[in-house]
Image: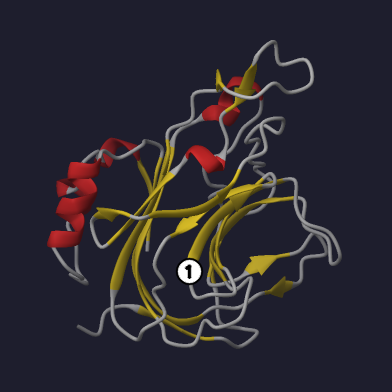
Amino acid sequence: MTDYMHFDGGSGSYVTASGYLGVAGEGVEQFHPRTVAFWIRTATQSGTANSVVYWGDGFTETAEPEFQNRIRFNNGGKLQLFGNTSYIETQNGVADGTWHHVAFVYEGGGHISGPLGPDRGGVRVRNFADANVYLDGELDNGRWKEDGVTDVQTSGQQDVVIGARVQTSGVFTDFFEGDLDEVAIWRHALPPTVISGVYAGGVRGSVNLSSLPFNHALELWY
């Protein structure tokens, strides 16, 4: 199969989904469910911060962001969904030179029972620590960090970027090295049976989008 995106890790190696701001919003809109899924092949992600999919804003050259939705590598070759100081990452690494299917699923939904936070009235907000990650069709939740105070308020300030992230200055950085295919964003939390079915279908290259499950909620496909 040759119909996939290759990224060489260089400064010009990324894709911008021009005009598409991802699943974003404020107030009630901030709790929109979402699924970000893709096939990935890499053997070189031994460092940290390399971005696979990014949108939102709040990045400066020296500070972490406030309002972002970002999938990046940690320093152990595992993938992490990060935003608003909370994250969930895969239990297993993917940087072994073979194709893997990865799906991060955030159900949204606002406040849930949990530790007290300032002015939260005995509940905490649902954040990316409450997301699930699937690796090769199986649940693969690993390390997570919870911030029970900060809502998931993904901003609509930046277009979706594949293979890098963009700082508030407009400079691109944290470039990914490897191959990606079927990068998709749904405004829906896909059920596990659908995710396992996508994995079972393998890396297909050419896909009839109208035949995909929940295609009415599919917002991005590369």
Residue at the limit of the structure toward the right, as seen here: 62
In the depicted view, which residue is nearer to us: 76 or 203?
76
Q: Residue furthest top?
A: 121
* Way the structure is coloured: secondary structure
Image quadrant holding the N terminus, namely bottom left
Measured as percent of width and height from the top left, residue 106 is found at 45, 39
Judge from the rendering whether residue 144 lies leftward or rightward of residue 149; answer left or right: left
Q: Which residue is mark 1?
A: 78
Q: x and y percent of residue 221 in the render?
A: 36, 57
Tell whether 196 sits left or right of 124.
Answer: left
150 shown above or below 110: below
Q: Secondary structure at mark 1?
A: loop
Q: Residue at x 68, y 44 (%)?
A: 84
Q: Which residue lies most toward the front here?
A: 115
Q: How many marks?
A: 1
Q: Say if 140 sits above or below 52 in the image.
A: above
Asked if residue 122 is positioned above or below residue 64 in the image, the reply reads: above
Left or right position of 69 against 186: right
Q: Quadrant of residue 61?
A: bottom right
x 49%, y 87%: residue: 44
Q: Is residue 183 visible?
A: no
- Position above or below: 175 against 103: below
- Nearest the eye: 175 or 5: 175
Q: Residues within 10 Å of mark 1 (few under 14, many from 20)?
A: many
Dot 1 amino acid type: Lys
x, y percentage for residue 41? 36, 79
Q: Which quadrant of the structure image shows residue 218?
A: top left
Residue 192, percent across and down?
24, 43
User: Which quadrant does the C terminus fall into?
Assistant: bottom left
